[in-house]
Amino acid sequence: MVEQHTPRSLIVTFYGAYGRAFEGAVPVSALIRLLGAVGVDAPAVRSSVSRLKRRGFLLPERAADGSAAYGLSEEARQLLDDGDRRIYGSREASDEWLLAVFSVPEQERHKRHLLRSRLARLGFGAVAPGVWIAPARLAEETGHTLERLQLTPYVELFRGAHLGFAPTAQAVARWWDLTSLAKQHEEFLDLHEPVLRALRTGPDPTPQEAYRAYLLALDGWRRLPYADPGLPRELLPADWPGDRAAAVFAELHDRLHELGAAFVEA
């Protein structure tokens, strides 16, 4: 399996990992150097930055020396802050669920599609048409997303327990495609567990090597805590690979992130 790292995704990953630590906006020249280290050429950087600007993720600014630079919009900062809790935060077990119940008029069916796609990207499972479910700890992030997309008039959110009638583990297996989620974890492990083994047994990487390995690992990992919303362990198969994938990423972060920052700052 070959992991897909698009220029636009890598730029978002870079801002999440290192861009917020810059004093002010990130110069375009720095973006070209730092994305070049993971195989993205200058035209692809400029094209992807333009698309992120049109989406409102990046804002054009000037660096201290007057050169072109890009900073994050407020919405982008909130998106990355929400992402931090997913990517690096602990997944506290809870018996409570968050229920999203929505109804969208037929004349606004494009918003129905947007709503379904965003709930899916947040990690919700589908219970029934217009009824989606997720662990209750995702309530704040879900609210931020619905407000940002101006979808709150169509949705009601509820928090509560599953009372039946099927056993909750059986219901969870209907609401989420656990086979597909397990495969995604296994694919991450296939690609990045060998990197971790090499770090444990080989010489220390250079700052550039650490930066490259970390950015690629983070770009591959950051989707998984959304596809897999952190379902209670007791509701998952006994051989669930998600725990091992999370442990591998956590150790890669501990070994590589700070060392990679030295290359960013060079």
Image: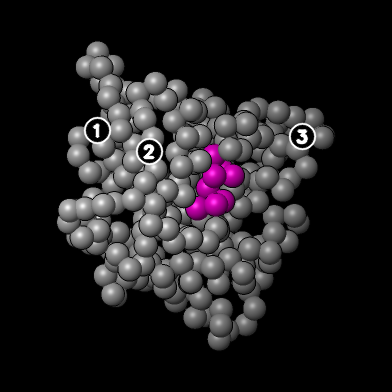
Disc 1 residue crowd, few under 14, some 14–19, many 20+, Cα 10 Å = some
Residue position marked by numbered label 2 in the rendering:
158
Amino acid type, residue under disc 2 in the picture: Phe
Amino acid type, residue under disc 3 in the picture: Ala
Distance of label 2 from label 3 (alpha carbons): 45 Å
Query: Which portion, as a residue range, is magenta?
Result: 79-86
In the picture, which quadrant includes the N terminus? bottom left
Image coordinates of residue 15 in percent, x first then y, are 61, 45
Distance of label 2 from label 1 (alpha carbons): 13 Å
Q: Is residue 220 visible?
A: no
Viewer-nearest of discs 2 and 1? 2
**In terms of depth relative to the viewer, which is nearer, 208 or 187?**
187
Question: Which mark, by number, is residue 204?
Answer: none
Residue position marked by numbered label 3 in the rendering:
63
Q: Residue at x 26, y 52 (%)?
A: 163
In the picture, which quadrant includes the C terminus? bottom right
Give whichever of discs 2 and 3 has the lower sequence position. 3
Disc 2 residue crowd, few under 14, some 14–19, many 20+, Cα 10 Å = few
Q: Residue at x 54, y 44 (%)?
A: 82
Viewer-nearest of discs 1 and 3? 1
114 w.r.t. 29: above or below: above
Question: In terms of image quadrants, where is residue 199?
Answer: bottom right
Q: Are marks 2 and 3 in contact (CB under 8 Å)?
A: no
Residue position marked by numbered label 1 in the rendering:
130
**In terms of depth relative to the viewer, which is nearer, 52 or 226?**
226
Image coordinates of residue 172 in percent, x first then y, are 25, 56
Image coordinates of residue 181 in percent, x first then y, are 30, 59
